[in-house]
Amino acid sequence: MTRTPAPTDTSAPTPTTVPWPSVVPTGSPPTDATVPPAQPRADTGTGAGTGPAPDADTADSPPVADAVAGAGTGARSAAPAEAGAQPVPGGPPAASVARTSGSGPGGVWEELVTSALLGTDRRTPPGGERGPGAAAALLDAAAAETVRRRAGLRPARAAGRPEAAPEDPRPPLPEAAARRLTMLLTDRPGTAGGGRRGSAPDLMELLPQWLATANARGFAAPPQTLPALLDAARGRTDLRPAALKFAGPRALWLARLNPDWRFALRAAPGGGAAPPGSGAMERARRLWAEGLFAERVALLATLRARDAVGARELLASTWATERAEDRLMFLDSLRTGLDAADEPFLEQALADRSRNVRATAAELLSALPRSALAARMAARAATCVSLDRTRTPPAIVVEAPHECDAGMERDGVVAKPPAGRGERSWWFGQLVEAAPLATWPARLAGRTAEEIVALTVSDGWQGELHAAWCRAAVRQRDGVWARALLGAPTAPDAGGPGAVSLAERAKLLGTLGAAERAEWVAGFIATHGLSEAFQLLGMCGVPWATPLGRAVVDALNIARDAGSYPWSFSGVMGLAERCLDPSEAGRLDALLAIPDEPEDASPGAGGYWAEAFQRLVTTLRLRAAMAEELRAGS
């Protein structure tokens, strides 16, 4: 039903309502007009509230539009009216539309929004009256005001057409693999009832492995998947390196057009500058001088991997003017390709005014066994450790330093210990950690690393000394000492003579080769089970070697037969889904049936185990299919 506006009697007094404004653009005013800023004000017309109105919007934003649309009762759609002095159905006549309230171009819109937020019973909309039709009048007025606001926008100069996306020379992804990638990117994992994971594979967890395989085979990402790839990498930082490598140069092209993907420009060296090409070094210098901090960090890391000398010279060129926290991050990039040529720069950093910078420089220098700092630390540590030959068998005697002098502090020794640590043990640990491991055979009568670790340490210093040797072996990547400190995986105490925690053992494993790592962890699981093996399994290469995979499956089967819930092994089961060799799926078929539960078993545990093994088998077969799809394009 269309309402006809009542005729206007020019001889009658003006109604006591807030008059309607003239058609004045609110987005961009004419250059000869002076538009005062919208300010809170008190309306004086009848029906107006006494509180300040909200600030005026400069565009028809969805939140404001929703607020107006939700006013009153019932739904009402208003067709856009032509801009100008046309009567609005249910609203004021054209003559009143042409009048202005004198409150600025955003005044009426402010009042409409306020009426919508407070309700028409509490705030009468401008140009309307209280009563059953107030809500409908508000929507009509909002529709007309929206059209006027849009019509009042001044056209801007058209933006330049973006350059064409760069070509990706890599071979295209096979069709089946492209469909699989789409499935992986659109998967939204859920849980079964009661928080259970169910038997369906978690496809999103397989995406990192899929990307690694695709990158290893040198495929290019399908253009239509690039937005989803960038969105996935935005949400998961662990995916970014592989996802951006697979997405290729077109990902950077897209990232320059969408602020949500700006992380790709920071992660890729020179991403914020022009695309790679001639003059790359000049662009790198410009980015180093003008880029954001994250862009400079990424640039330095990449240059370091490609040209260690050039990266160090670039860092030295601005070192004196960098902030302390920035110097610390930049210095950390020197870990890549660290060699003796970095020693002069690092020695200068030992005099830095920031304690954290000095400590990092000292750590890097101690990782160079032939550096001057390593020699100084070896001399200090050697005075603290000696061999007492009067005992049978001989034992190691420790005499920790009694003070931390200025030279020790300059070389990175932190003088103040953390809470709960004694000063002397704190200083002693730092000295031994920074000393080259080659110091000790010469100091302890030519004994090997295994023989040294097996020696008794007097006066309760064994834990402190062995923990420092563990840190030194990890820092210096010394596999001989790592093996000695790890000991045999079948040791009754579930650890080697020098390992003080699972974290220390995991770090020591990182210094060994992949095959040796897998063999040691397999022996550990066979002896001690899975309760302490999660961190150790995370250090093993993917897919797991056959002995390691079978040790894990056997341990899971033992836990199932014991009747315990699989939730205690959910972390190991998740690793198995991603790391077991897919060829092991056939061996697991026998574990899919629900086992007979012993009397002391947890209720329903058998069903949960069958479900977990079903998910494991399904995931392994899916991984085999994914590998075959990627292999088909080679």
Image (tube, rainbow, N blue to C red):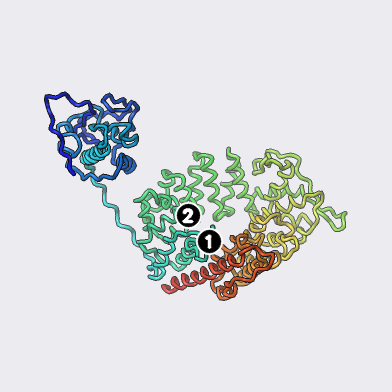
Q: Is residue 298 left or right of residue 341?
A: left
Task: Say which of marks 2 and 1 sits in front.
Answer: 1
User: Which residue does the image show at 50% across and 46% down from the upper left?
Assistant: 315
> Quarter of the image holding residue 527?
bottom right
| Position of 606 relative to 372 (above/below) | below
| Position of 292 relative to 537 (above/below) | above
Q: Is residue 94 left or right of residue 191?
A: left
> Quarter of the image holding residue 99?
top left
User: Which residue does the image show at 25% across and 28% down from the upper left?
Assistant: 103
Residue 601 percent coordinates (x, y): 67, 65
Please give the residue where the numbered disc 2 appears in the rendered image: 236
Q: Is residue 347 left or right of residue 286?
A: right
Q: Residues under labels 2 and 1: Cα distance?
A: 21 Å
Of 615 and 257, nearer the camera is: 615
User: Which residue does the image show at 85% across and 58% down from the upper left?
Assistant: 393
| Quadrant position of the N terminus in the picture | top left
**Is there any visible trace of residue 273 in the rendered image?**
yes
| Quadrant position of the C terminus in the picture | bottom left
| Position of 200 relative to 241 (above/below) | below
Q: Which disc number belongs to residue 197?
A: 1
Q: Is residue 208 left or right of residue 108?
A: right
Of 266 and 98, nearer the camera is: 98
Dot 1 amino acid type = Arg
Dot 2 amino acid type = Arg
Residue 209 percent coordinates (x, y): 50, 64
